[in-house]
Image: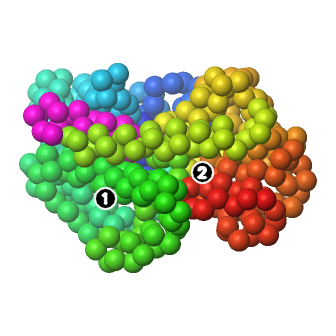
Amino acid sequence: MTITFVGHGYVGLVTACVFADFGNDVWVIGRTPEKIEKLKNGDPLIYEPGLEEMLKRNLEANRLHFTLEYDKAISSSEIVFIAVGTPPSPTGEADLSSVLTVGEQIGKHLNPDHFTVVSCKSTVPVGTNLKVKDIVEKNKPKSAEFAVASCPEFLREGTGIYDTLNPDRVVVGSYSQKAVDLVIEVHKPLPGERVVTDLASAEIIKYASNAMLATKISFANLISLYAEKTGGNIQTIMDAVGADKRIGRRFLYPGIGYGGSCFPKDVMALTETGKHSGLNTNLLDAVEEVNDMVKENFIQKVKKYAKGNKLGIWGLSFKPNTDDIRFAPSIHIIKALLKDGYEITAFDPAAMTNVKKQIGDKITYADSLYDVPDGADALLILTEWNEFLQADLKKVKKMLKQPVIIDGRNIYDLEKMKALGFVYISTGRPSVAA
């Protein structure tokens, strides 16, 4: 099958590479000449484990094509996936300008000789696919036949290839059985339950899924604050809560809040949609409020336990195995600490280039994790990268001016840190004194 993806971010590029790996002929349309040239040369532009290898493999097999032009890609495709960004507007609503502009271009280049599915993988509010339908209808050649379908994605950054290859479910919403059949066909190599539904339900499913996961994180964070106030241990608490099969343990992990390109914007967008519909959105408001609260709680720990103004930071990306810093808690925390006069040296395996674009030279970027604690008054852990888990903590202790680690991700064992003689402050667990 010939397929086009408009957009080459985490969703578009990963899914395009996977579908090309299945033997499909896949086009990817971008809008920046420099980025398209890099993609043609095997540079995925983003950090995602295994993606570069998959990209190069399918380029060499001539199954994957990158272009700035719509004509050849759209006219030859049976399915066109829209996979462009829907960032939050200043009010919190999803900005649909890219989706709608792409819809116009797709319409202009539809092939009048065959049926085409226009399928939105971008996360969009209810009613967006119908707006796309109207725009395509207005701009298409008179004899061109098409139908729209909502096919939301559920991949996680850092495990994008695995998630695309192993979905729990494939959701397809459409008014056209012909469109449903084609979208189901292209997903045939993938496991997972098939959920075929209407457009509105498919659009809501993605928002509801992300809002539920964000709610679990905020719930765990709220209970971690209870634990800190009362002497409890959040790890034991969440192990017991998660043992209930009705609840489950996944995403009940406390820390310094969720970030990334999905949870923050999707919770905000669902909240705004609800308010416009006259609904009470207090639950979603509270999810966001707790997410902000735990970042501020971490900043207060730094002020309390760091006996000086020189800080080291391990981890900048919003989660491990990605270079994405969109809505990363680290950015909020660093900006607040800089405002209070702290000097910061930081290391991240993948995200430092992106952080530098935002923060510039206001902080020092280390070449390795062991350059960070040298002479620092405290070491802060903001992302749980694997290479931090078994770092040489005896070496770290010797390098620190004060043996203080403030851990926003709970990556170390309390008894181990006590035996090593650290002041170890984690999240929702008893403090360890030297």
Q: Quadrant of the N terminus?
A: bottom left
Query: Type of residue at label 1?
Result: Val
- Mark 2 element type: loop
Examine the image and state in which quarter residue 180 appears: bottom left
Tell me which numbered mark, 2 or 1, is placed earlier along the sequence: 1
**Residue 300's x, y, as percent?**
59, 39
Question: As displayed, is residue 99 above or below residue 76?
Answer: above
Specify whether residue 147 is in view. Answer: yes
Which residue reaches farthest front?
230
Mark 1 highlights which residue? 186
Count of marks placed on residues: 2
Mark 2 highlights which residue? 408
For the record, the magenta segment spans 260-280
**Residue depicted at x 83% and y 47%:** 402
- Mark 1 element type: helix
Q: Does the magenta stretch include residue 266?
A: yes
| Position of residue 87 in the picture relative to residue 408 (left or right) | left
